[in-house]
Image (tube, rainbow, N blue to C red):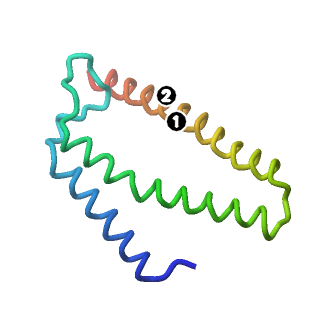
Amino acid sequence: MVHSGSRHRLLLFTRLSSWLIEHMSEPEEFPLVARKSQSRLTTKQKFGYGAASLPHGLIGNIKGFFLNAFLLEVAGVPAQYAGIILLGTKAFDAVYMNLTIKLADAVAVLIQWSED
């Protein structure tokens, strides 16, 4: 069980990182469709994206750690099968994320074409 203090710190960190990203750059620097002529990200922007993704990564790692312990100790699943289960979830995430990104890019292009 997560203590309320830990939950409060995570919420505070998430809000802080969102604020950092919001105030580090102008919105017009991030169009829906990336153009080849765009400049590279600044160090401040990279830090902001990293800070914003930290809570999500922490939660994912914590859940994976406790799922592994649960599968091995409580459910009594053999280690090789627990590894296959955890690998399967990561592979699903990789495929799902790529499909979601391609779909979002296609929708952004359609939106851009409809505005022209």
**What residue would you read off at disc 2?**
102
Q: Position of residue 64 (x, y in %)?
A: 62, 57
- As drawn, the label of residue 87 is none
Furthest toward the front, the residue is 79
Instruction: Look at 83% across and 66% down and name the residue there.
Output: 75
Q: Amino acid at mark 2?
A: Lys
Q: Position of residue 89 (x, y in %)?
A: 67, 46
**Is disc 2 surrounded by few (<14), some (14 to 19) or many (20+) residues within 10 Å?**
few
Q: Position of residue 13 (x, y in %)?
A: 32, 65
- Image position of 112 with respect to 80: above or below: above
- Quick one: 43 or 18, which is closer to the camera? 43
- Image position of 45 with respect to 40: above or below: below
Instruction: Look at 21% across and 51% down and name the residue there.
Output: 22
**What residue would you read off at disc 1?**
100
Q: Amino acid at mark 1?
A: Thr
- How many angstroms separate mark 2 from mark 1 (CA)? 5 Å
Could you tell me which quadrant the N terminus lies in?
bottom right
